[in-house]
Image: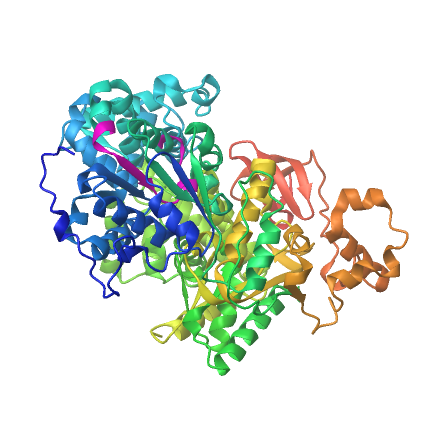
Amino acid sequence: MTTSDPFDIDALEPSFSAPTPTPAEPPYLQGLNPPQREAVLETDGPLLVLAGAGTGKTRALTTRLAHILTTRKAAPWEVLAVTFTNKAAREMKERVTKLVGPAAERMWIGTFHALCVRLLRKHAELVGLRSNFTILDTDDQIRLLKQLIQAEAIDDKRWPARLLAALIDRWKNRALLPDKLPSGEASAYANGMGGKLYAAYQSRLETLNAVDFGDLLLHVVTLLQNNPDVLKSYQEQFRYVLVDEYQDTNVAQYLWLRLLAQGHKNICCVGDDDQSIYGWRGAEVGNILRFETDFPGAKVIRLEQNYRSSGHILGAAGGLIAANETRLGKTLWTEASAGEPVRVRGVWDAPEEARSITDEIEHLKSQGHKASEIAILVRAGFQMREIEERLITVGLPYRVVGGPRFYERAEIRDALAYLRLVVQANDDLAFERIVNLPKRGLGAASLQKVHHLARAHGVSLLRAAEQIAELDDLRPQARRSLGSFVSDVLRWQSLLPTADPQDLAGQILDESGYTGMWQADKSPEAPGRLDNLKELVSAIGEFESLPAFLEHIALVMDNDAGDESEKLSVMTLHAAKGLEFDTVFLPGWEEGVFPSQRSLDENGAAGLEEERRLAYVGITRARKRAAIYFAANRQLYGQWQSSLPSRFIDELPGDHIEVDSRDGLFGASRQASYQTAAFDDWDQSHHDRYGPGWQRREARSRQNPQTIDGYSRRVQAPKPVSTFAVGERVFHDKFGYGEIVDIDGNKLMVAFDKAGEKRVMDNFVRAA
């Protein structure tokens, strides 16, 4: 092997103590199981390592790297190892360094983006950049797009910059340049302007000598495709390519890897198709599914021995994921004991679900279990509110992993600021937070004048704004915007004594434009933020007034402050990937919540399979015990709804689960319920249409005729009926005249003459 770099193989000594090995057994191979050993020793040719959850894939991957170096199959700079996170890259480098010494420092180990920056700095001029290019953050990217949108005289309220940014990011993830966009996608923004704006954006970035994160991969793919000599040099250099978490790669990452691996064809991809859960951000599970087609002659090694979970947990998870049709297939097993069956418990409603989980946690703690080894994993962030409040009430310290606590989220703090200002006009901090949120065209100079007037006269900012809006000290647009804002706040204040607090909170968020701001935001986070706002409004329904609710929030936040003791973890299932705990609680396994109705609506069968993979990930986070909860009733967005248990519960193998029968609502086991006389004359057509979940609901209804569909009548409150009719003209104090186009209970969809379509409560309009 001829290289220009020194490579002292004698320095590659393992850094751990081990028995003196025989020549045929290097120390780094000791302790590997047969499939792991095979994955390490099978160095030449394309290799796919299907590594199930908890099967030691990181050890196999790092040991493979060490083996390549110690056997002189490649020098460190001839090995490319790619990960998805900086943490994973650091861990990989540290592990290899412990095995082979400082030579590992010369390897190309890093994230996709970090490695692409390294390549792009060296060849920037080939893609129209200079080597000192700037990498824009999201704020700079949005600011630049806004300039381009305004230059085209496009209504940025109807076509926000964030929507265009999300589209461009999606195009770059698929390695689509402006001139390669399908015509349908190019016209997806601003009536056909998407492609033109994308091209203008890329041109502007080149002028600024800047890139965004999507460009890092896109430019390198373009570089390699358009410069055969550069591509050949890297294909020759990288004798071995190793990729972690291959199931999470997008199209651009896939193309980049495939280009570089075509030289020596020694590419090893490690991943698990059953844990591909990031389709919403561009990951293509098809990349790992077609590996053998992309690389003819590829070998597939399955790591199936699990070192994390008990037998029942693996059996339940394996039976569930087997329902997916698009998978390569593997069966996890363990030498550990069967352990406790996965518990499935039905409860009456979400508050009881939260109480049951906290009771279980307190019981575990009383038996000596550490809180840090307990986790609550939810499908969606809005589920956290009920659970967090219960944890705080009973004094169980917790931390939210992967994001802030519910009441600390930006959208919740914004919404609370609106409510605080309505309840307390002197709350200057609340005024400052929301006076220009959403944007109302109030610049720093205008707000500074409000502050000066408030200090000069010793009044609140709201009172100062009211006064200055009547003067000529501000430019007309700012004066109108400020006056409208103050008028809205005063009108909402006048409604405090009589309006239902929940309805008023929804009205404030809608009429302020805050809800609309997030509805117009097309980023992946926006739907979750809207769900959180709906959950907040729903929570207000439990209180007699807005002041009472705000007092409750203040006490909740105060009780939680400063607690640094050992904490249990609360997080979404997406945030839990890669983590493990002794005990895992999985609440909210109901149709529409999990699987997510939004995912089913947007992605159909593919969405359902990704939801099932997410359920698999959730169960396999548990080492010793897992508990699944579903509620018969759940309040979603202010409305009580009867819920069907998730179809995933029906797919859990009966041999590995235990249905909790401590309450009477779901007393019998699933298997026994199927054998009751209630199903003797069951119509097969109903079974085909509704499935086993419907059977349980029907059975409960027959067993207890005093319920509706098996659930108590008290949650089936009659829907309010509006006295208005579709087509009727109405008047709203803020939006003016309009015509009713749709009615949902006491909520009206009104097409206002000047304000467009708005949803309002019927008690806030009057006949015109």
Q: Is residue 408 left or right of residue 209?
A: right
Is residue 759 among the parts visible in the rendering? no
Specify whether 1 is left or right of 250. left
The x and y percentages for residue 498 are 59, 61
Q: Which quarter of the figure has residue 77? A: top left
Left or right of 742: which side holds 461?
left
Residue 496 rendering spot, x and y as whole percentages: 53, 60
* Residue at point 65%, 36% (across, down): 740
Picture quarter with the N terminus? top left
Q: Percent x, y for residue 645?
A: 68, 56
Taking depth in this image into account, of 474 and 323 the one nearest to the observer is 323
Q: In the figure, 486 relative to 439: above or below?
A: below
Q: Is residue 241 found inside the magenta-colored segment of the image?
A: yes
Q: Does residue 742 lie above or below 152 as drawn?
A: below
Residue 586 in the magenta stretch? The answer is: no
- Is 386 or 28 nearer to us in this picture? 28
Seen from the viewer's position, the closer of residues 460 and 757 is: 757
User: Can you give x and y, in whole percent of width and height, for residue 551 in the image?
Assistant: 46, 70
Any part of residue 16 in sight? yes
Residue 316, compared with residue 759, is above or below; it is below
Magenta residues, start to end = 235-252
Q: Residue at x 22, y 48 (%)?
A: 70
Closer-to-camera residue (570/513): 570
Q: Is residue 596 above or below residue 363?
A: above
